């Protein structure tokens, strides 16, 4: 069970790009209107800092997952508590992403297919790749999904070049102040904070020394892609209309029309995007199952997969509608709790205490 | 009879032993020569496996001459076959174990027994009817060698040896099957094929426990990594040049006596789209053709399910003009699109199967029935819409374009579950099916080599060779 450098990069790109391009553009537009792209860049800066922090923390005990070394650094009970917090975030966000993706697919592709059918199919696929395969197979799948996603997204930018009106991006920095721009940056930054996968994946990497550099590359590429997508959305629709949309980028894709024959490209992009989301969900399933097994001291992590799948099913089918899931979770849980505590405070704490411990244990 | 049973000095006892072993074997011939008691001689061989004329010239004549001379000399000694220089030509081996001698007879050797010697002499005169070397049927090529393997193992190894005249080409032989005792040859280029791979294949071959091996495909099923996968994990070929080029790539080949198919391991997914001819045609053309092949294989897998998904779930994705003509064609068709597609696909598979089994003369009748009845009449009568016929026919053509027959089978098979998914979940179903297939391909391994490499896991240095064929030699000569 090892991930090569390339596999790690591809997997991380799939999971960062697919979510950010989908859900972070709209909040940035709402807060900062035509300056949203500056918000995205700013959030990207925060994301880079977080990724650096994650890299530093993982380097403390590169052959262990956070579930193990949090015990070493903070002592058994505090360590277990920290792991527990991470599990809370991972379990819940995995369920939210699954539900979101299913809702989105239903919206884009279906009329009356029930949500639980879509969720079940996705879950079966996730269980299949984790249970029959392992992390390596997810890595290999990511090698196909990641580059494919980048190529397709790049293609949508190019095909839309004929439709853009560059003057829509002006005036820059005059209508809105710094506060709005900073406000708009948090969603994107918190999504980039999913670099915390490194805390779990470090022991599985073949190139542990280069992990920090690789994750920075991933974040940088994501920033470029999302900034371009934001600029594209603004230049196509102006700042006001897309702020009301949930998924402005996909509307931008739908705008493509070539020869009056190639239209409705959004569905193809959604299918490629689904590949990347599948990578992300499978990886969440892996870290949750593997981490839970470590936390409870269960020998075979694969036996946890089924429990996790059952949890995901109920947790993702229960919420009544999509606004509860996207807006409420993002606003009240993700940005206010997960982002500051799990992506900044706790890694910092682990880094400081861990470094001190290592120093004091050295002669 | 155990392997430790041995012959006695008395030739009569030995004969009755052998007769008991070969009871009711009408093809085993026992020949004794009319000769004095102390020079009794017995020949045992399997009729039809032995070149009798050669045997008589090389063995019997010298022995009869010897008998006559010793008769006239008044010599009372027994026959000393080993001391006779004349028999050196006959490639003689000796053994006193009954089992070994019986095996030899069954393999087409002649067993000679003489009075006073407690061992059998085996002379190799095996010759049996076999097919000549012909052009391979499945993998015909426009350019390149036209010889194909036959059912005779020696012929096949000689074909490979002729292509690779180097002592580094190793042809290890072993026997598998407790009843059939089939000869098997493991071929590899020492120093080119990784030792770990050769050891792995050898180990897996040795671990096979079975009564009989009737064809190379038996071996394939025994040693492949994933028994339940529809994808072939060993490449089979009738072409010596394909085997030779694979050996040069560091793979190993397995040849089985009685089978014109050689197995090549490890196989990757991309091998399924490389024809033998790719090495002989101009490389630019080959690059183009390979790209077309990949498109065609995608078509053969998902075209019907795509059609179903788009027309039933996402008509807005089809350009208006096209959708209009499809709707017009579907006017008054009684079946839903899914059912229609299923019916036509099954019909097509039926036609293909029927054409495969029938003799050539009747085979053409099947195609006429298929074309006229299914194609024309069904559309005319309004049972089936014309677009479906087009889709199914295109799918058929696409699946025939896959160069390796064994690679086209999984796609034929997987088309149906994808159709069912498309009928229930539209494009999402097709996407889910594609994810499942891709996951499976990423998970597969053939002799520790990932099946989907060099794409996933990525190996840049091999990527070029897998997808296109780079030109040979340096530039500017």
Image (tube, helix red, strand yellow):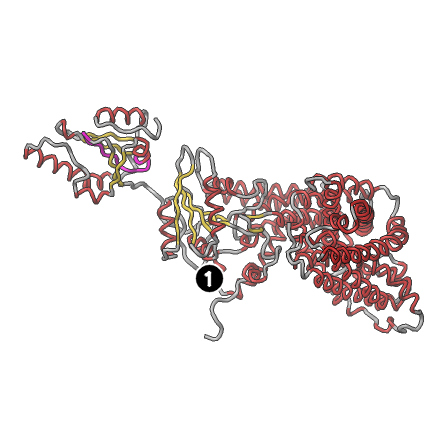
Quadrant of the rendered image containing residue A163: bottom right
Q: Residue at x 89, y 61 (%)?
A: A243
Res. B212 image quadrant: top left
For the question of whether residue A92 can be seen, the reply is no
Q: Where is residue B32 shown, x and y percent of the image?
A: 19, 29
Side of A284 where A235 appears, left or right: right
Q: Examine the structure image and report whether residue B133 is included in the region drawn in magenta.
A: no
- In the rendered image, the residue lying farthest to the bottom is B476
Q: Nearer the viewer, residue B207 or B111?
A: B207
Task: Mark yes or no: residue B117 visible.
Answer: yes
Q: Residue furthest left?
A: B73
Q: For numbered disc 1, what is the local secondary structure?
A: loop
The x and y percentages for residue B142 are: 45, 58
Residue B249 vs residue A242, the one in the foreground: B249
Res. A11 image quadrant? bottom right
Q: How many marks?
A: 1
Magenta segment: B104-116
Residue B108 left/right relative to A363: left
The x, y position of residue A108, in whole percent, is 80, 52
x, y percent for residue B290? 56, 59
Q: Is residue A95 above or below residue A362?
A: above
| Magenta-drawn stretch contains B114 | yes
- Residue under pointer 1: B280
Crowding around mark 1 (Cα neighbors within 10 Å: few <14, some 14 to 19, many 20+) is: some
Quadrant (top left/top right/bottom left/bottom right) for the C terminus of chain A = bottom right
Q: Chain of mark 1?
A: B
Q: Nearer the viewer, residue A51 or B352?
A: A51
Is residue A274 shown above or below A44?
above
State whether residue B289 is above or below residue B417. below
């Amino acid at each position: 069970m090892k991930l090569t450098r390339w596999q790690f990069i591809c997997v991380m790109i799939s999971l960062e790009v697919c979510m950010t391009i989908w859900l972070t553009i709209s909040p940035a537009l709402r807060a900062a209107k035509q300056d949203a792209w500056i918000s995205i860049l700013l959030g990207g800066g925060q994301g880079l800092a977080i990724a650096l922090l994650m890299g530093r923390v993982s380097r403390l005990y590169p052959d262990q997952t956070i579930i193990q070394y949090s015990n070493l650094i903070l002592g058994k009970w505090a360590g277990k508590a920290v792991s527990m917090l991470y599990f809370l975030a991972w379990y819940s966000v995995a369920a939210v992403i699954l539900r979101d993706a299913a809702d989105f697919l239903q919206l884009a592709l279906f009329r009356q297919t029930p949500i639980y059918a879509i969720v079940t199919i996705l879950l079966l696929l996730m269980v299949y790749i984790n249970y029959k395969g392992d992390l390596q197979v997810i890595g290999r799948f990511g090698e196909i999904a990641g580059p494919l996603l980048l190529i397709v997204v790049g293609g949508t930018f190019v095909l839309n070049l004929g439709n853009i009106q560059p003057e829509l991006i002006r005036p820059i920095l005059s209508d809105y102040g710094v506060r709005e721009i900073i406000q708009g940056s948090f969603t994107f930054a918190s999504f980039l904070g999913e670099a915390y996968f490194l805390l779990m994946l470090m022991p599985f990497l073949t190139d542990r020394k280069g992990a920090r550099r690789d994750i920075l590359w991933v974040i940088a590429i994501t920033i470029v892609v999302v900034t371009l997508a934001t600029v594209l959305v603004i230049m196509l629709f102006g700042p006001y209309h897309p702020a009301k949309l949930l998924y402005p980028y996909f509307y931008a894709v739908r705008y493509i029309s070539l020869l009056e024959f190639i239209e409705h490209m959004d569905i193809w992009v959604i299918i490629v995007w689904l590949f990347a989301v599948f990578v992300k969900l499978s990886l969440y399933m892996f870290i949750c199952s593997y981490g839970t097994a470590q936390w409870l001291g269960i020998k075979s992590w694969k036996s946890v997969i089924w429990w996790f799948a059952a949890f995901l099913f109920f947790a993702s089918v229960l919420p009544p509608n999509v606004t509860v899931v996207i807006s409420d979770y993002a606003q009240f849980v993700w940005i206010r709790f997960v982002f500051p505590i799990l992506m900044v405070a706790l890694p910092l704490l682990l880094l400081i205490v861990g470094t001190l411990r290592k120093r004091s244990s050295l002669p | 009879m155990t392997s430790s049973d041995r012959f006695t000095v008395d030739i009569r006892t030995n004969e009755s032993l052998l007769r008991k072993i070969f009871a009711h074997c009408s093809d085993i011939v026992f020949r004794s020569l009319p000769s004095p008691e102390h020079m009794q001689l017995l020949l045992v061989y399997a009729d039809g496996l032995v070149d009798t004329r050669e045997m008589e010239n090389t063995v019997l004549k010298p022995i009869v001459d010897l008998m006559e001379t010793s008769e006239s000399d008044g010599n009372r000694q027994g026959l000393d076959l080993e001391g006779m220089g004349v028999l050196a030509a006959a490639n003689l081996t000796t053994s006193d174990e009954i089992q070994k001698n019986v095996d030899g007879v069954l393999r087409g050797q002649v067993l000679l027994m003489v009075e006073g010697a407690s061992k059998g002499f085996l002379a190799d005169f095996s010759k049996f009817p076999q097919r000549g070397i012909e052009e391979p049927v499945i993998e015909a090529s426009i350019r390149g060698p036209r010889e194909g393997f036959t059912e005779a193992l020696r012929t096949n190894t000689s074909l490979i040896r002729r292509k690779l005249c180097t002592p580094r080409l190793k042809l290890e032989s072993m026997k598998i099957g407790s009843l059939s005792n089939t000869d098997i040859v493991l071929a590899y280029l020492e120093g080119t094929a990784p030792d770990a791979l050769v050891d792995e294949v050898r180990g897996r071959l040795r671990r096979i426990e079975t009564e009989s091996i009737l064809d190379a495909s038996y071996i394939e099923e025994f040693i492949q990594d994933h028994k339940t996968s529809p994808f072939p994990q060993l490449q089979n070929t009738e072409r010596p040049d394909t085997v030779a080029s694979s050996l040069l790539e560091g793979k190993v080949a397995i040849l089985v006596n009685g089978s014109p198919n050689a197995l090549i391991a490890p196989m990757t997914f991309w091998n399924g789209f490389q024809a033998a001819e790719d090495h002989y045609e101009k490389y630019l053309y080959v690059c183009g053709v390979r790209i077309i092949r990949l498109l065609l294989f995608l078509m053969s897998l998902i075209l019907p399910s795509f059609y179903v998904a788009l027309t039933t779930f996402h008509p807005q994705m089809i350009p208006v003009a096209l959708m209009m003509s499809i709707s017009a064609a579907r006017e008054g068709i009684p079946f839903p699109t899914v059912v229609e597609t299923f019916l036509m696909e099954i019909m097509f598979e039926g036609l293909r199967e029927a054409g495969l089994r029938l003799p050539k003369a009747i085979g053409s009748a099947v195609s006429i029935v298929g074309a006229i009845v299914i194609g024309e009449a069904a559309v005319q009568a309004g049972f089936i819409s014309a677009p479906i016929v087009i889709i199914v026919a295109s799918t058929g053509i696409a699946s025939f374009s896959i160069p390796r027959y064994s690679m086209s089978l999984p796609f034929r098979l997987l088309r149906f579950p994808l159709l069912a998914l498309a009928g229930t979940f539209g494009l999402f179903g097709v996407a889910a099916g594609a994810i499942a297939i891709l996951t499976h391909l990423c998970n597969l391994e053939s002799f520790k080599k990932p099946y989907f490499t060099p794409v996933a896991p990525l190996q840049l240095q091999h990527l070029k060779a897998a997808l296109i064929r780079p030109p040979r030699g340096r530039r500017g000569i």
